Amino acid sequence: MEAQYAFKATENQYKKQFKKWKIDHKRLKGAEFKAIVRKKRERERGNPAKNTEFRLRGEKVEGSKIIRYQKR
């Protein structure tokens, strides 16, 4: 950033901007997984054959990650 745009920011300035842009998460949090698992179970009760795809912040959540979290 500094070389290309002549903009030098501190670490805290970058962190604040990332939160503003909502890209401060590297991975899913426990509460987010719990909500996904809860919704998955609700949908399976209604139609067990239906395969649901979950997205969070525009990114697809892999089914293998959901299954692995359920085993905990």
Image: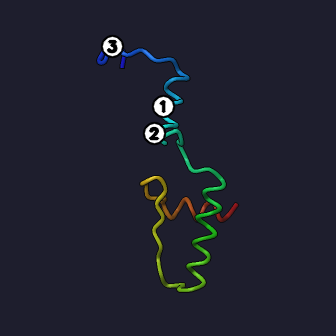
Say which label, 1 or 3, has the lower sequence index.
3
User: Residue at coordinates 48% horizontally, 59% vertically from top-left?
Assistant: 61
CA separation in Å, label 2 and label 1: 6 Å
Give amino acid for label 1. Gln
User: Residue at coordinates 52% horizontally, 62% vertically from top-left?
Assistant: 64
* SS of the residue under disc 3: loop
Give amino acid for label 3. Ala
Indicate the position of residue 38 as horizontal and vertical percent values: 64, 69
Indicate the position of residue 28 as horizontal and vertical percent values: 57, 50
Neighbor class of circle 1 (other Cα within 10 Å; few <14, some 14-19, many 20+) is few
Out of 21 and 42, give the one closest to the viewer: 21
Q: Is residue 8 above or below residue 28?
A: above
Rendered image quadrant of residue 44: bottom right
Total numbered badges shown on the rendered structure: 3
User: Which label number is shown at residue 40?
Assistant: none
User: Which label number is shown at residue 6?
Assistant: 3
User: Which label number is shown at residue 21?
Assistant: 2
Q: Are marks 3 and 2 in contact (CB under 8 Å)?
A: no
Neighbor class of circle 3 (other Cα within 10 Å; few <14, some 14-19, many 20+) is few
Q: Do the residues labelled 2 and 1 touch (CB within 8 Å)?
A: yes
User: Residue at coordinates 67% horizontally, 64% vertically from top-left?
Assistant: 71
Out of 55 and 62, give the one closest to the viewer: 55
CA separation in Å, label 3 and label 2: 21 Å
Residue hosting label 1: 17
Q: Is residue 58 above or below residue 18?
A: below
User: Residue at coordinates 53% horizontally, 21% vertically from top-left?
Assistant: 11
Indicate the position of residue 30 as horizontal and vertical percent values: 66, 53
Out of 48 and 19, give the one closest to the viewer: 19
